[in-house]
């Protein structure tokens, strides 16, 4: 048995996945605060609790995500682009394009046959088209972000949401509702607008099947459908989609153990 851990410290959540001989045996998910080193420790401890395993059994820990250097107990840090590509390929080996929509970043990643990164594109510094954009607009309409995807799918007369800036979009959606529009129709417009922005990033690296959707926003079924409509292809998602960066990180560690380091990652 070879137990390895991947710890993904994102801008919004900390994820940890434990892999034992290529099987996911434990995982954890929690919001991040200001103490990232502690969040990383907690993520590992919770995943160990989930797997009913002891820390002494872990052979390798790989950190990833924006806070990967805060995984101070890890042996290696790998970029999240490489980890999402690797994790998506692990679950869906036919993946050629990954779209990762997290709390702060949206990335489109072209993936090769072995799960390697061929090219990638990401949003600029602003939050437009990311999970944060959805979080803010959901809050402005009085919903939890976990509810808005299903509601958007019930829209009968989808509206257009044209603001690309989070602050303007927030006032655009609230003013629609203030004018008596159905929130479901507003939400459908919001989802379509994010799908459009993601599609532009995907086009920059080249759209090819299979497309795999990773990151927390892939839990939003309204976003999955809006993306499929925009791209014109089936989009792979799984209950593990939010964890795929951590899965990829753990896989890098497993590879390190089976093939001693030659430099680079
Ligand atoms: N149950 C849910 N339903 C719908 N959306 C969700 C749900 N849970 C989380 N999200 C979305 O996922 C986002 C967080 O995604 P994720 O955990 O991939 O972010 P992150 O990795 O911390 O961020 P980044 O990669 O941008 O640094 C939240 O902002 C929220 O919009
Ligand atoms: Mg992330």
Image: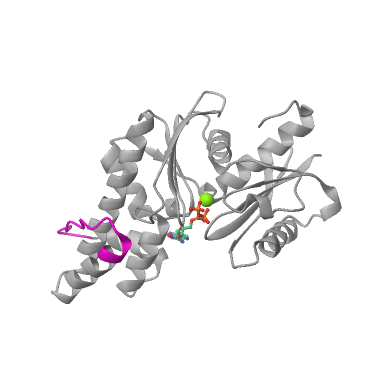
Q: Is residue 7 magenta?
A: no
Q: Is residue 130 left or right of residue 246?
A: left
Residue 153 in view, yes or no: no
Name the spot of residue 63 as percent of width and height, x first: 67, 47
User: Which residue is more in the foreground, 99 or 150?
Assistant: 99
Q: Is 45 drawn above or below residue 81 in the view shown?
A: below
Q: Nearer the viewer, residue 3 or 135?
A: 135
What stretch of residues is rendered in magenta?
155-168
Residue at 45%, 29% in the rendered image: 96
Indicate the quadrant containing the C terminus: top left, top right, bottom left or bottom right: top right
Residue 60 image position (x, y, % from top left): 77, 43
Q: From what the image shows, is residue 2 above or below residue 215?
A: above
Image side of residue 91 versus residue 135, left or right: right
User: In the drawing, does residue 27 fall left or right of residue 177?
Assistant: right
The overriding secondary structure of the stretch rendered in magenta is loop
**In front here: 51 or 209?**
209
């Amino acid at each position: 048995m070879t137990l390895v851990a991947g710890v993904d410290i994102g801008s919004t959540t900390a994820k940890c996945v434990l892999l034992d001989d290529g099987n996911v045996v434990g995982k954890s998910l929690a919001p991040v605060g200001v103490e990232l080193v502690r969040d990383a420790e907690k993520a590992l401890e919770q995943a160990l609790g989930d797997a009913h395993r002891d820390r002494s059994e872990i052979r390798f820990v790989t950190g990833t995500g924006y806070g990967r250097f805060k995984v101070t107990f890890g042996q290696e840090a790998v970029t999240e682009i490489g980890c999402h590509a690797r994790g998506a390929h692990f679950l869906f080996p036919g993946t050629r394009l990954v779209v990762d929509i997290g709390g702060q970043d949206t990335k489109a990643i072209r993936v090769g046959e072995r799960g390697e990164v061929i090219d990638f594109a990401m949003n600029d510094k602003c939050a437009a088209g990311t999970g944060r954009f959805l979080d803010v607009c959901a809050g402005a309409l009085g919903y939890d972000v976990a509810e808005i995807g299903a509601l958007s799918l019930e829209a009968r007369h989808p509206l257009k949401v044209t603001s690309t800036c989070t602050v303007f979009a927030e006032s655009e959606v609230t003013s629609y509702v203030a004018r008596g529009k159905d929130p479901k129709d507003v939400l459908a417009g919001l989802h379509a607008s994010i799908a459009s922005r993601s599609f532009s990033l995907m086009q920059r690296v080249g759209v090819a099947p299979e497309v795999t959707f990773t990151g927390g926003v892939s839990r939003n079924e309204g976003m999955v459908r809006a993306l499929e409509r925009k791209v014109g292809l089936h989009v792979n998602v799984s209950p593990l989609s939010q964890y795929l960066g951590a899965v990829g990180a753990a896989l890098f560690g497993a590879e390190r153990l089976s093939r001693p380091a030659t430099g680079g990652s």
